[in-house]
Amino acid sequence: MPRGVVTRLVRLLRMPMRHDGEVLRTAFSRRAAITYSVGVRRFARQKRAAPAAHRSPVAGTGRLAPVVRALLRLPVPVFGLLLGREWCVEVR
């Protein structure tokens, strides 16, 4: 996922970070480093089921748990709109 998208989401959701701001400046990938992206909206049902199968992100008390629970409550078409793309960096 492009780093800028993650940074904007953290700010929009006002998610407190355990780490200093440097973590966000180096997490994920720079947009320029992303070599291709894949549309996965047609697999939204399976993609939504994956985190639901793991109890700790859903039932846990971590900072991301409420976000994961909210995403899992979304209807499949809406989930697909929000998370229907995956970004890749080809390692050469």
Image (cartoon, rainbow, N blue to C red):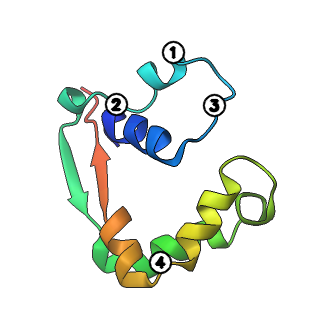
Residue 65 % position (x, y): 69, 57
CA distance separating discs 1 and 2: 14 Å
Left or right position of 87 against 70: left
The residue that mark 3 highlights is: 17
User: Identity of the amino acid at label 4?
Assistant: Gln
The residue that mark 1 highlights is: 22
CA distance separating discs 2 and 4: 24 Å
Residue at image coords 51%, 15%: 22
- Kindly identify which numbered label has been placed on residue 29: 2
The residue that mark 4 highlights is: 46
Left or right position of 26 against 89: right
User: Identity of the amino acid at label 1?
Assistant: Glu
Q: Tell me if mark 3 has few (under 14), some (14-19) or many (20+) residues whose alpha carbon lies within 10 angstroms of its own.
A: few
Residue at image coords 64%, 35%: 16
CA distance separating discs 1 and 4: 33 Å
User: Identity of the amino acid at label 2?
Assistant: Ser
